[in-house]
Amino acid sequence: MRSIWRTLDRDLARDIGLVCLADCIVGVSYGAIAVGSGFPIWAPMLLSLVVFAGASQFMFIGIVASGGNPIAAVVAGLLVNARHLPFGFAIGDVLGKSWARRLVGTHLMIDENVAFALAQRDADRRRAAYWACGIGLFVCWNAGVVAGAFAGTAIADTSAFGLDAAFPAVLLALVLPALRDKATRLPVAIGVVVALATTPFLPAGLPVLLALVGVLAGIAAKDPERETEGAH
Amino acid sequence: MEPLTLIIATVVLGAGTFAFRFAGPVLRARVTLSPRSERLMATAAVVLLAALVAITALTDGHEFAGFARPAGVLVGGVLAWRKAPFVVVVLAAGATAALLRVVGVP
């Protein structure tokens, strides 16, 4: 573990710290909204510890609070979280070899630390970014949720602070360097268009997964290029 | 909802989410990928994250999120493209959306 903190330079640590702070405030609002809509005080805390995936947790409490059945809430939450499978496949090597690390690292997998890991060049930094961001977010998110659950509706509306714009901006800033690679742009463009076009009609989570058709387009587009390379 | 039902639902959602998270690294360890497939996997993750950016920036549930949020994300995106520091990108995105709302933009 110590090597992780040594690899982490000050800039990266500061960036991760900022994301943790932002997510902590979102956690406060999540705790407040959950308790405000009638959940017992332990419910948002248990969800945050056991599920640890903000979007699906908001989805879950939203469906249950509006009188939906718990099975529907679980299925909707799972659909939102299905993207973690391809995430894990892409960053599988950052978790480490021992079982303890793999289990803990698995539970800490979340959009932000996957994005931070992908944005690093070498394997050591990738691992350091993944773990530091994962641990930091787990602590801050849960601390925020506890504070929100007790403080009630103090910060129920995070949109007043523009935090709803900060989350996509965080991911965008981390993904942009990858978009400088020409071969990545077409799959991303197709994926984004498909996801946006299907969002009005499909349940949350599915449009994100459908974006993967962009990768197929990338494969198809790359093949002729390879052939011409081979002809040289 | 009964406390027990709520606990069971939470545990099932947690277990299912863990299974999704676990499946990737496990599958990854069992197959040897060519460098090209490795690149495709990284591309797949970038595509998912980009789709997530677009959806969370532009939509709320099944509807348009209003102008303040995408405007904030756009400002952040332009700054990031110009290689502004990460902190500046994130704070500018949030501040833009917040200020637009103060002046009445939804």
Image (spheres, coloured by chain):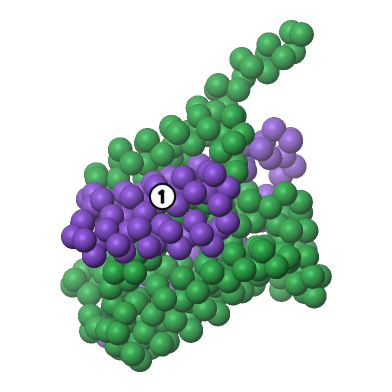
Label 1, secondary structure: give it: helix
Where's residue A157, x and y in %?
A: 28, 73
Residue at x 32%, y 55% (from the top left corner): B69
- Write down the residue under mark 1: B75
Where's residue B35, x and y in %?
A: 74, 36
Where's residue A22, x and y in %?
A: 46, 70
Q: Is residue A99 visible?
A: no
Q: How crowded is mark 1: few (under 14 residues within 10 Å), some or many (20 or more)?
A: many
Label 1 sits on what residue type?
Answer: Val
Judge left or right: residue A142 versus residue A60.
right
Judge left or right: residue A146 versus residue A39.
right
Where's residue A83, x and y in %?
A: 48, 53
- Outermost residue to the top: A231
Q: Nearer the viewer, residue A122 or A56?
A: A122
* Quarter-of-image position of residue A155: bottom left
Residue at x 33%, y 50% (from the top left corner): B71
Quadrant where the C terminus of chain B is found in the figure: bottom left
Q: How many labels does the image show?
A: 1
In the rendered image, the vertical position of residue B41 relative to residue A88, given as above or below: above
Judge left or right: residue A173 versus residue B31.
left
Q: In which chain is the residue bearing label 1?
A: B
Quadrant where the N terminus of chain B is found in the figure: bottom left
- Please give the letter of the chain rendered in purple: B
Q: Can residue A36 be seen in this view?
A: yes
Residue at x 72%, y 39% (from the top left corner): B33
Q: Which of A109 and A184 is in front in this view?
A: A184
Residue at x 59%, y 67% (from the top left corner): A16
Judge left or right: residue A223 versus residue A75.
right
Q: Nearer the viewer, residue A40 or B9?
A: A40
- Please give the letter of the chain rendered in green: A
Q: Which of B71 and A96 is in front in this view?
A: B71
In the rendered image, the vertical position of residue A12 relative to residue B71, given as above or below: below
